[in-house]
Image (cartoon, rainbow, N blue to C red):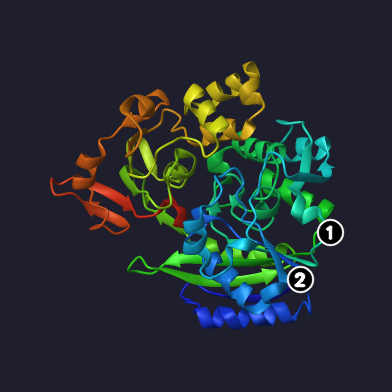
Amino acid sequence: MIYYSDGGPDRDLTKEEIKNALKSILDSFGDRKKVLILPPDITRAHSGAGMITGLLWEQLGERILNILPALGTHVPMEESEISAMYGRVPHSLFREHRWRTDIDELGRVPSEFIREVTGGRLGFDYPVQVNSLLASGVHDLIISVGQVVPHEVTGMANYNKNVFVGCGGSEAINKSHFIGAVHGIENILGTTDNPVRAVLNKASEIAAPRLPLLYILTVVAPDSDGHLKIRGLFAGDDIGCFSQAASLSREVNFTILPERLQKVVVWLDPGEFKSTWLGNKSIYRTRMAIADEGELVVLAPGVRTFGEDPAIDRLIRKYGYRTTPEILSYVTDNDDLKDNLSAAAHLIHGSPEGRFRVTYAAGQLTREEVESVGYSYGILDELMQKYNPQKLTTGFQTSTDGEDFYFISNPATGLWKASS
């Protein structure tokens, strides 16, 4: 059922409008007294979900028992990040999602279903895993808050991904990512009808009796000056609200270019992107816009590691961002990668497949580290002088020496692809 729907390509929802919308949504659920909130973490700082979580706390107060940021495999949030994202919400409410240990299983999606949706390419079953807090039965309302935007694993981010991946366990995370990688990142980006989403929707059916879920979804996009605006707010307890949000996201988060680009330059804000695990959105969201033999330059002053998790970081360093056939052969022959399929999927997603060149100007990784995983090394200071992100806006640009390029100020805000 859809409880709220408001959005459009030129809509600019104010904080007061969102506050009133939340009151209307909560009134539909009556007097719920034990609430769990699942917001995104700091890697989705621009989603509007931090503000919404703060407004929910203002309206629900002591009825909120727990707030569990949907970390997935990301590093836990620091105290300063909690304050920056959620404002005055008490830190005592926040819990850490330990994706390797604090997990309950609610059932399994059968292997026959996986085989059907993957066209026979995969035949394992899929665990419906959630953090133990969700499965505890303590809460009479679980509010999942997040942004719908193009995503490399599920096609479009959020909805039940926030629950079964963001708050899921290692097996679920591994298998969901690998299903997406096998299907092909360029086949999945920006879609809602794909094998990963089909599996997550089946997981929702299995988990529904145990999880009193309400989804509150935003759609965010920049205006002509590059300022991010909340273009839509949708709430519901089933796929209807997600479908509406995804439809709007396709309007405002997709940039269709007339032809493929020879050079793309992407800026990664150091406060948001500290690893290639996150920073490779620069590759995911632009790969369908880059020409054969083209170049992607990634300005990444904050990137200091590859994986968000030490174990995954070691795997990225060991195998690198190789072609899909190479990674699939590594999975077959190596138990460490076979047991960490999300890492294998990430290596596939982050590979230019030999089609274009990635120059990574990582501020806190050495030349040896960057080149060891298959990227070209960029000297950050030199490239920052040539492509000054403080003076550029997203779109076509020309450098002082006459070079034409396309600049993107934040790859997390959309998807760029060529029409041909």
Q: Give how far across and how far down residue 55 sits, in percent.
A: 58, 75
Does 256 sit above or below residue 260? below
Relative horizontal placement of residue 233, taking residue 120 as reference (left or right)? left
Q: Residue at x 47, y 29 (%)?
A: 321
Q: Give how far across and how far down residue 353 sits, in percent.
A: 46, 30
Tell which of 96 and 115 is nearer to you: 96
Does 66 sit above or below residue 353? below
Q: Quadrant of residue 213?
A: bottom right
| Circle 1: element type | loop
Does 259 sit above or below residue 304? below
Inter-mark Cα distance, 1 to 2? 22 Å
Residue count near mark 1 (Cα–Cα under 10 Å), binned few <14, some 14–19, many ≥20: few
Q: Give how far across and how far down residue 185 sits, in percent.
A: 55, 40
Q: Is residue 175 visible?
A: yes
Quarter that holds the N terminus: bottom right
Residue identifier under label 2? 1
Residue identifier under label 1? 137
Does 233 sit above or below residue 307? below
Q: Quadrant of residue 62?
A: bottom right
